[in-house]
Image: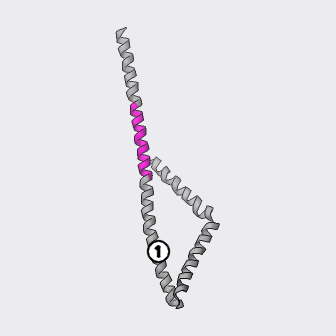
Amino acid sequence: MQPEKTHLEDVADKAHEYLNTRLDIGKLKAMEYGAVAFAAVLGRLILLMIGFCALIFASIALAIYLSVITRNVWMGCLIVSGLYLLLILILKLNKKRLLDTPLANIFILQFHKKDEN
């Protein structure tokens, strides 16, 4: 009887070891997905911040240029503000087509591309 008990203990030990290994693999995969998602978000955030700075400087330059053309400082700033309000209105009216759907597609493609690797 003793050898069977040892064999059963051996099988139980191997099953326990297998389950622990699978759990570790699951944790590592979850950590990898989290790291990839964090890196993607952080990378896009950095690009967004740089783009925002460029947009601010371009807006100031356009406002100054329009102020020189109109010979009125507040008119140049008002025209640039009006352009931004028009852009906001266009985005608001076409939010689903211009923002929601493309952003959802980018998100889905990002994780689909990760699954292929």
Residue 117 appears in the figure: no
In the depicted structure, whether residue 106 falls above or below residue 62 = above
Please name the residue shown 42% across and 58% down the image.
42
Per the image, the residue denoted by label 1 is: 56
Few, some or many C-alpha atoms within 10 Å of disc 1 (few <14, some 14-19, many ≥20)?
few
Q: Where residue 56 appears, x then y in whole percent?
A: 47, 74
The coloring applied to the image is one colour
Please name the residue shown 52% across and 90% down the image.
69
Q: Which of 61 and 3 is in front in this view?
A: 61
Q: Where residue 13 appears, x then y in whole percent?
A: 37, 23
Q: Which of 100 and 71 is in front in this view?
A: 71
Left-right relation of 6 to 110? left
Secondary element at image label 1 = helix
Could you tell me which quadrant the N terminus lies in?
A: top left
Q: Where residue 65 appears, x then y in whole percent?
A: 48, 85
Residue 7 appears in the figure: yes
Give the main secondary structure of the magenta stretch.
Answer: helix
Q: Give the range drawn in magenta.
A: 20-37
Three-letter code for the amino acid on which mark 1 is drawn: Ile
Please name the residue shown 41% across and 40% down the image.
27
The residue lying furthest to the bottom in this view is 71
